[in-house]
Image (spheres, rainbow, N blue to C red):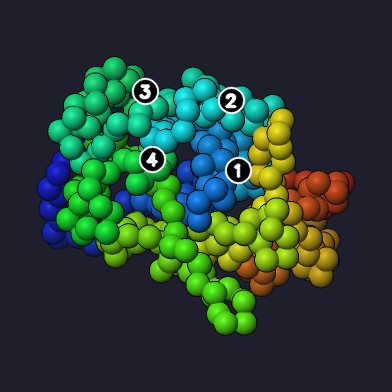
Amino acid sequence: MRSILRGYTGKDLMRIEQAKAKPLVEGLLFENDYVMVAAPPKIGKSLFVQQLACALSSGEPFLDTFEVPNAVNVWYFATEGKDEDTKDRLIRMSHAHPIDPEKIFLFCSAGLRFNTNDGLKLLNGIEEQWGKDYPPKVIIIDALYRAVKGSIKDDDVVNEFHQVVGALADKYDAAVIVVHHMKKPVYFESGSKQERSDDDVFGSVFLKASVDQMYWLDKCDKDPKDIVLKCDTQRSGNAIEGLRLTLVEPDPLYYKITSMFKDEMHRVITVLNSHKNGMTFDQLKKATGLKRTTLYQCLRELDDLGTTTRSKTKPVIHKMYGSHTP
């Protein structure tokens, strides 16, 4: 647990705690991150973060692509929707992707307002019952507009919410994911839609300013059944330039990455063929010159095709299938 006020000088001022740069989900979520996932209404943002919660609880790769180094406890605050519907989604997701129900703590309440005295009492009760034995490493709040009392256009209201959530995260040294919605899209006279960005989040400017990074989802122009995941500014190095996701439903229920990069995969194969002992992800990224997201997808496709393999050790070593150490 961190204190409310922290001071640094001398050697402490010039030293960074490297442990805080550790990923909870490789390239997507890091320790102590404050992240916002935003999307237009009914686009599937709750499904997205629920699938993320499953991966965090089990330690299995998110979207079958992004490595999860360790399984962690997740506190999931569902402030909208029916309890049984949320549980049903998690059950259907578990039919395709592992989930550890002992590491997910689902708190459903349409009346939980984090920036109120009643909300603080509810949070204190949760902490007394589960905080000591099952401290969260990730806290998910879905959705923001139901977790705040007052207008989310009001700077003071938003800052009060951030203060409460920040104190909760500090107490457990946890990352926070807040689910929110975006402004209505802007259309030109031609009928085309204005390009989306992080600036399209709805509400006070402090919503975007207070988070470390913001992921947003929107319909795919090429196929409205699919969605696109983007992040304009991300401290982990722009791992997400644009992922196209397809929803598999009704049972099992999950998102999968849909994309093929023929030329890029050929580049990866060429590099790995010249390194029989294999390479780490970062080594491959440097050698191929590919962006992180593109390389993630190439390796996933090549693994699915049986062209490459990955080690079970850390760091993960990627090799051509059949490669061996002399």
Q: Secondary structure at mark 1?
A: loop
Label 4 is placed on what type of residue? Ile
Front tag of 2 and 1: 2
Sequence order check, earlier mark of 1 and 4: 1
Residue 145, position as x, y percentages in the image: 35, 46
At 47% from the left and 63% from the top, the residue drawn is 184
Q: Where, by quadrant of the figure, is residue 261 drawn?
A: bottom right
At 55% from the left and 57% from the top, the residue drawn is 217
Label 2 is placed on what type of residue? Asp
How far apart are the alpha carbons under marks 4 and 3?
18 Å
The residue identified by callout 3 is 134
Above/below status of 100 relative to 225: above
Instruction: Assess whether mark 3 and mark 1 are in contact (beta carbons under 8 angstroms).
Output: no
The residue identified by callout 4 is 141
In the image, farthest residue toward the bottom: 189
The residue identified by callout 1 is 62
Q: Is residue 52 visible?
A: no
The residue identified by callout 2 is 88
Residue 325, position as x, y percentages in the image: 79, 47
Q: Residues within 10 Å of mark 1 (few under 14, many from 20)?
A: many
Q: Residues within 10 Å of mark 2 (few under 14, many from 20)?
A: few
How far apart are the alpha carbons under marks 2 and 3?
23 Å
The foreground one among 326 and 75 is 75
Residue 70, position as x, y percentages in the image: 51, 35
Front tag of 2 and 3: 2
Residue 139, position as x, y percentages in the image: 38, 38
Q: Where, by quadrant of the figure, is residue 271 drawn?
A: bottom right
Q: Secondary structure at mark 3?
A: loop
